[in-house]
């Protein structure tokens, strides 16, 4: 009876609350509560209502239903980009069939695939993640926002997998008439990659089930007891207005008895551009697990702080089912809980991640608390207005500008690539003998150049190993000098904790300090590492070009180093610090990182550098995910009881003992170690790919030089001249606009 409009029914009968209470022999406060939450109405009470009205129960229910909220009205803010992408496909499609038939067009085919990847990634809509405990009402909110209750209700109330919701127009052609696809994970510690939905081969490798909406109930609902343990994620395509402006991901509730639910929630959260964090209003942020997970969200959320997109605009902390508390009390709940939560945030953590002091942050943060209720429109108006503002007026400018710049950069690089091919063939055709001599010289020099490149790589690896050693030592020394009993007593006094609060929150507070210190340590080393990598790749490019120097007069044929580097980064199994470096040099790494699972807005933030890059560490390291899960599930806790005036010293001693027993620092040391080890592995893989591409380049030169028919070379000249025009004239209006700057603070963005 949750949809029953008791207030409308009472008013139709002509009763006040007091009059109806008198007739039914109950308190007026009871009538008031039932009007706010008719789902709590007992059957006896409802039957008495029917008797008073002299109506049959079915007539009462059918004629007095609460009006369901309408789907959130969002304009098609990306309609122009959709049309531009269609025009691009129309321009390219006739050529694909032609190029596929001829091996000499393989480079062009590769560039077309790269363009598709760029438009899919940078043209992606913001991903909205709904996060919260299993009873928070995440799926119910999706029903309301999309206006399609009948479909989404099939997997409520216990989502057992990650469910991505996209607009029906975004469905890839390989899915045919099916609207739902269910996938297995890539590996035990790596989920299915949502960003690869257009990659048919990848998806078909991981598909478990494909069909219509009913398969969700069969395979993604834990209550039915038939959910497949292999299921990791599902993608659902719906015809809903809001999905024209964003994609939505419904995550399993965290902190349940199912560890996999928590792992999936953590994993998918790191892909999100926008987070809606829901908790029931009548227990809003009262549980330790809720507080710990929200703190983890704050650590990892993409950071923007510009005039267009203010700090934390992409975070919504929502008291769901707010009608239970009531309009008159919900503001007090939001204020008190936002204040209580803010007390759990350390100054060090805020400074390291957001580059503002805690006082400034708290003033912004408390404005990100909202209420939500299906039953009471006034309780969701503020949220809907802010959410709509973000989707319609704030984020589109970032997305459109980045996509425009990405395609402009692609066009420029493609023109240069094929113009160099023309130069190469013209040079060889003009002076075959001289070209052959220079090629043979390059072959002789290749072992020496490769040895020099490997020596340069070893210097970078030495830096990595030194940084790993220094960073872990610094972390250990910090713990020894800082996390002492006297420091913890001071922390208790600073937070003004009583015994219960100290036992509940101290370990969480201290974990923030560990996390902030880890960020601080890595930031310093990575800044130096980025400078070193930039010089390293510049030196490698010079040595690669020296091997491809075939010239007539002053004409020199450059090696496509950037393409080789991009291919190496895209193919690397792990990146570590290479990911941070790559994202600072334009399209080379940005779209690759997103394809590997980093959120789009995080990648854009990294591309500006500064604090935004540091805050995005968590999406690249991986270690803190394990840390967050361990803390959120309460792996360790203070269990002793403390009495008397000296309880602060005794609890401080217990905290130090617990931290040592649980070896908490090892989780942070493991994160640092993983970051640098991944950097080493990634660097080796990228260098191997670059050397391989140099080998291919030289082999290609050999084939051309040894070609006996000049007409073959002349034909390649004409082909590549045509490709210069083809890629240079890609239809994309507005691709020269300047990217909206994003960064750690407004002053930085304005100065840039």
Image (cartoon, helix red, strand yellow):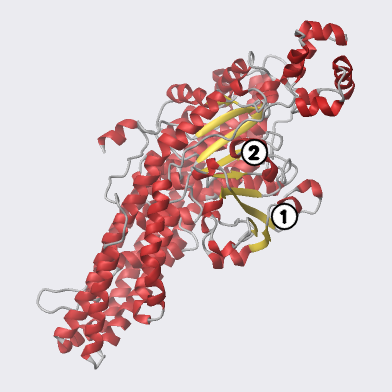
Q: Which of the 4 image quadrants contains residue 63?
A: top right
Q: Residue at left 90%, top 21%?
A: 44
Q: Is residue 578 visible?
A: no
Observer-nearest residue: 352 or 489? 352
Q: Which mark is residue 143?
A: 2
Give the quarter of the figure containing the C terminus: top left
State whether residue 61 is above or below residue 391: above
Mark 2 or mark 1: whose residue is earlier in sequence: 2
Q: Which of the 4 image quadrants contains residue 157?
A: top right
Q: Residue at left 82%, top 27%?
A: 59
Mark 2 to mark 1 CA distance (whole Å) = 18 Å
Q: Where is residue 144 drawn, in percent x and y?
A: 63, 35
Give the quarter of the figure containing the N terminus: top right
State whether residue 321 is above or below residue 335: below
Q: Where is residue 137 drawn, in percent x and y?
A: 68, 34
Q: Residue at left 29%, top 67%?
A: 726
**Residue at disc 2, secondary structure:** helix
Q: Residue at left 64%, top 38%?
A: 143
Q: Given contact means CB atoms under 8 Å apart, are the residues at marks 2 and 1 in contact?
A: no
Q: Which of the 4 image quadrants contains residue 288?
A: top right
Residue 154 vs residue 90: left or right? right
Observer-nearest residue: 14 or 737? 14
Q: Which mark is residue 227?
A: none
Q: Where is residue 609 drawn, in percent x and y?
A: 35, 44
Q: Which mark is residue 215?
A: 1
Q: How many residues crowd mark 1 within 10 Å: few (<14), some (14–19), many (20+)?
A: some
Q: Where is residue 715 drawn, in percent x and y?
A: 25, 83
Observer-nearest residue: 653 or 76? 76
């Amino acid at each position: 009876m949750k949809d029953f409009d008791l207030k409308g029914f009472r008013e139709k009968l002509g009763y006040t609350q007091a009059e109806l209470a008198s007739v039914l022999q109950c308190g007026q406060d009871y009538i008031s509560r039932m009007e706010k939450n008719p789902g709590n109405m007992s059957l006896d009470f409802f039957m008495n209502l029917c008797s008073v009205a002299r109506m049959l129960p079915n007539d009462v229910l059918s004629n007095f239903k609460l009006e369901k909220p309408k789907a959130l009205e969002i304009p098609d803010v990306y309609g122009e980009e959709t049309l531009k992408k269609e025009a691009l496909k129309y321009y390219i499609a006739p050529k694909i069939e032609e190029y596929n038939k001829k091996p000499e067009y393989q480079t062009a085919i590769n560039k077309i695939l790269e363009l598709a990847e760029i438009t899919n990634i940078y043209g992606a809509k913001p991903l909205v993640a709904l996060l919260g405990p299993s009873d928070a009402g995440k799926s119910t909110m999706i029903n309301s926002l999309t206006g399609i209750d009948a479909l989404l209700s099939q997997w409520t109330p216990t989502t057992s997998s990650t469910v991505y919701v996209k607009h029906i127009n975004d469905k890839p052609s390989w899915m045919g008439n099916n609207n739902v696809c269910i996938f297995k994970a890539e590996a035990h510690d790596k989920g299915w990659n949502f960003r690869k939905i257009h990659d048919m081969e990848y998806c078909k490798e991981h598909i478990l089930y494909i069909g219509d909406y009913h398969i969700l109930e069969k395979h993604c609902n834990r209550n039915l007891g038939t959910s497949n343990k292999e299921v990791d994620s599902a993608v659902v395509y719906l015809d809903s207005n809001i999905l024209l402006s964003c994609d939505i991901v419904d995550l399993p509730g965290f902190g349940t008895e199912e560890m996999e639910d928590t792992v999936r929630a953590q994993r998918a959260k790191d892909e999100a551009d926008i987070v809606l964090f829901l908790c029931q209003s009548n227990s809003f942020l009262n549980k330790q697990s809720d507080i710990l997970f929200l703190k983890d969200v704050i650590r990892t959320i993409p950071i923007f702080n510009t005039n267009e997109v203010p700090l934390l605009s992409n975070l919504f902390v929502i008291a769901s089912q707010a009608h239970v508390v009531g309009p008159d009390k919900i503001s007090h709940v939001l204020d008190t809980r936002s204040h209580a939560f803010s007390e759990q945030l350390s100054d060090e953590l805020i400074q390291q991640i957001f580059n503002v002091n805690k006082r400034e942050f708290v003033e912004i943060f408390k404005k990100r608390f909202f209420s939500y209720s299906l039953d009471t429109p006034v309780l969701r108006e503020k949220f809907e207005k802010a959410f709509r503002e973000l989707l319609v007026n704030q984020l589109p400018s970032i997305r459109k500008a980045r996509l425009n710049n990405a395609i402009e950069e692609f066009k420029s690089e493609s023109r240069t690539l094929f113009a160099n091919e023309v130069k190469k063939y013209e040079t060889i055709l003009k002076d075959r003998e001289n070209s052959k001599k220079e090629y043979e010289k390059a072959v002789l020099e290749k072992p020496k150049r490769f040895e020099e490149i490997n020596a340069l790589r070893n210097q970078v690896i030495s830096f990595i190993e030194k940084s790993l050693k220094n960073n872990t030592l610094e972390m250990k020394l910090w713990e020894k000098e800082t996390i002492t009993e006297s420091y913890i007593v001071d922390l208790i006094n600073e937070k003004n904790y009583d015994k219960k609060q100290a036992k509940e929150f101290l370990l969480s507070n201290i974990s923030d300090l560990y996390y902030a210190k880890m960020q601080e340590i890595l930031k310093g080393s990575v800044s130096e590492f980025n400078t070193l990598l930039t010089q390293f790749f510049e030196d490698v490019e010079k040595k690669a070009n020296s091997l491809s120097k075939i010239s007539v007069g002053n004409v020199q044929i450059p090696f496509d180093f950037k393409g080789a580097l991009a291919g190496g980064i895209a193919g690397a199994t792990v990146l570590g610090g290479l990911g941070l470096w790559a994202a600072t040099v334009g399209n080379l790494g940005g779209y690759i990182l997103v394809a590997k699972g980093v959120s789009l807005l995080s990648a854009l933030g990294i591309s500006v550098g500064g604090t935004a890059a540091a805050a995005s560490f968590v999406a690249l390291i991986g270690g803190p995910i394990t840390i967050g899960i361990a803390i959120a599930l309460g792996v360790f806790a203070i269990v002793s009881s403390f009495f008397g005036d000296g309880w602060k010293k005794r609890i401080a001693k217990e905290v130090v003992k617990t931290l040592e027993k649980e070896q908490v620092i090892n989780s942070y040391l493991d994160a640092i170690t993983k970051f640098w080890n991944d950097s080493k592995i990634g660097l080796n893989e990228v260098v191997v790919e670059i050397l391989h591409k140099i080998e291919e380049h030289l082999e290609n030169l050999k084939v051309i030089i040894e070609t006996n028919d000049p007409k073959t070379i002349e034909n390649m000249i004409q082909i590549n001249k045509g490709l210069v025009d083809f890629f240079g004239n890609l239809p994309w209006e507005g691709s020269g606009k300047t990217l909206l700057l994003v960064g750690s603070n407004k002053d930085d963005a304005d100065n840039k």
